[in-house]
Image (cartoon, rainbow, N blue to C red):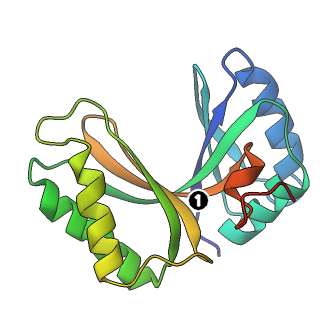
């Protein structure tokens, strides 16, 4: 039995219900047990057994109106004031998974001890460990004040993010 994947979808504010309906219609043929676990302003979360590669292919092939970004939750870490330790845990996760990264974004809420310098530290660690690769995947690291979330970005509405040359395919 395949493991459940938690998917976070960023949507145009005010269109959450339409996106829920369209995404469930889109994914149901692939997973009859897909379910929405949360809806809030500009965000929809769901659980599915569809593998990451298939989700990436589905959302690229059949774009849904009002979706900004689709992310797959890969790792949750407790938020620590020891920023360097948490960043090492993130890098260890990438090393264990054998992940190569094309681009990574870091979105920080106001968390004591965390600053934009965390991005510089993370990039240095990724570079040192040979994890940056122009053919790699997109990732996002986000905090909510209580935990650190590592997401694989499966789809984004901006076509330049997916094209290695930056040109629209």
> In the visual, does 120 lie left or right of 31?
left
* Residue 24 makes an appearance in the image: yes
Measured as percent of width and height from the top left, residue 40 is found at 56, 22
The residue most toward the top is 14
Decide which of 55, 132 is in the foreground and name it.
132
Q: Quadrant of residue 93?
A: bottom left
Q: Quadrant of residue 23?
A: top right
Relative height, residue 81 to residue 22 (above, below): below
* Residue 51 makes an appearance in the image: no
Decide which of 1, 71 is in the foreground and name it.
71
Residue lying at 29% horizontally and 62% vertically, measured from the top left: 122
Residue lying at 9% horizontally and 54% vertically, measured from the top left: 82
> In the visual, does 29 lie left or right of 56?
right
Residue lying at 27% horizontally and 69% vertically, measured from the top left: 124
Relative height, residue 136 to residue 59 (above, below): below
| Quarter containing the C terminus | bottom right
Residue lying at 77% horizontally and 68% vertically, measured from the top left: 54
Measured as percent of width and height from the top left, residue 128 is found at 29, 81
How many numbered marks, from 0 up?
A: 1
Measured as percent of width and height from the top left, residue 35 is found at 69, 43
**In what element is the residue under mark 1?**
strand
Relative height, residue 50 to residue 13 (above, below): below
Measured as percent of width and height from the top left, residue 13 is found at 66, 18
């Amino acid at each position: 039995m395949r493991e459940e994947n938690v998917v976070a979808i960023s949507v145009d504010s005010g269109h959450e219900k339409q996106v829920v309906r369209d995404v469930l219609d889109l994914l149901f043929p692939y997973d009859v047990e897909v379910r929405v676990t949360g809806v809030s302003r500009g965000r929809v979360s769901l659980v599915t057994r569809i593998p990451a590669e298939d989700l990436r292919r589905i959302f690229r092939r059949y774009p849904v109106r009002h979706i900004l970004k689709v992310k797959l939750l890969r790792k949750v870490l407790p938020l620590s004031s020891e920023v360097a330790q948490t960043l090492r845990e993130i890098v260890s996760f990438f090393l264990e998974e054998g992940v190569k990264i094309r681009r990574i974004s870091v979105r920080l809420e106001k968390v004591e001890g965390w600053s934009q310098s965390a991005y510089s530290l993370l990039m240095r660690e990724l570079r040192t460990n040979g994890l940056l690769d122009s053919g790699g995947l997109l990732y996002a690291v986000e905090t909510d004040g209580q935990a650190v979330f590592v997401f694989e970005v499966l789809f984004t509405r901006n076509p330049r993010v997916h094209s290695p040359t930056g040109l629209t395919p």
